[in-house]
Image (cartoon, rainbow, N blue to C red):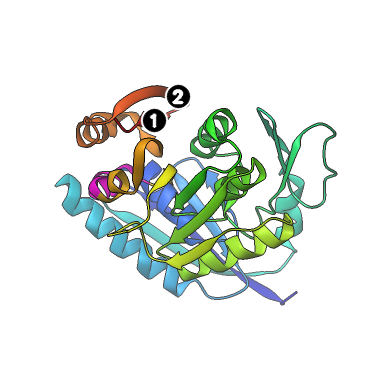
Amino acid sequence: MKEFYYEVVITPSSHKDEIESFLMDHFYNGIEENGNSLILRSEEPLDEIILKTKEYVKNLSNIFSENIDIDIKIEKKKNIDWIEEYKKSITPVEVGNFYIHPSWYEPKKGKIDIVIDPALAFGSGHHPSTLNCLKLIDEIVKKGDEVLDVGTGSGILAIAAAKKGAVVDICDTDELAIKEAEKNFKLNKTEFNKAWVGSAVNLQKKYDIVIANIVADVLVFLAKDLKNALKDGGFLILSGIVDKYLQNVLEKYKDLDLIKKIEKDEWITLLFKKR
């Protein structure tokens, strides 16, 4: 453990949910919420994630044609082992047949065990968008299904599908996310079929199920590619949608059949089927 660590407090003027989702897809040491602020901590400088966040907010401002400001405060602090303190706040999550827990908890008898250490990688199962996806994966994935997880992050959703017997491919635009997902697959003693850095653009392969737990603007942007990745009769799980952007997403996917809509807090997950 190093003597000091860096703490970054990001306070957006608006669109906190979208910025939080972006950060959770690109930062792997856990994120703390304090009112309207998002707190990141790391023993390494956080210059790169700050730069990425500023660029994302700039793009977000252009997408929604409004000025979005972010206040960023950076402090170098004496290390009191904040990871250990963070661990104390993390408890297991039970979703359908899945039992998601950090490695310092024991498995639960009769449940499908998924081990994720949230202090090291995003995707612990606590976020509503992840919970909603896990519910649907538990309901629809069956042995032998070919599944693609777009924007895999920690790999938790792909791991859940694999533990249901699916053959899974994973992709993410962040190379570090792919590396973290690979570690989590090994931690869970399960395997993926193929992984790549990138998205679902111009894929030749078709899947029984495609999962995309990302932000609404990206779901809108990728609509054509996500639909093209589906087999006829295949299922598409979309998540990471806040209510105010639901209609934008629904409009882009109106040529699919909406099978189910799940809401938790302000977050919405949609299950579509290709005709």
Residue drawn 32% across and 63% down?
A: 54
Residue at the extreme left = 65
Amino acid on which the number 2 mark rests in the picture: Ile
Q: Which residues are magenta?
A: 215-224
The circle on residue 162 is: none
- Residue carrying label 2: 262
Residue drawn 33% across and 28% down?
A: 243
Question: Does the CB distance between marks 2 and 1 fall below 8 Å?
Answer: yes
Q: Is residue 124 visible?
A: no
Q: Give coordinates of residue 10: x percent, y percent.
A: 43, 55
Who is closer to the viewer here, 193 or 189? 193
Our reading of the magenta stretch's main secondary structure is helix
Q: Work out whether 61 lies above or below 35.
A: below
Amino acid on which the number 1 mark rests in the picture: Leu
Q: Work out whether 113 lies above or below 95.
A: below
What is the distance, in whole Å, between disc 2 and disc 1 at their CAs? 6 Å
Compared across the picture, whether 22 is left or right of 141 comes to: left
Q: Is residue 135 visible?
A: yes
Q: Give coordinates of residue 126: x percent, y percent.
A: 60, 39
- Residue carrying label 1: 270
Compared across the picture, whether 113 is left or right of 22 comes to: right
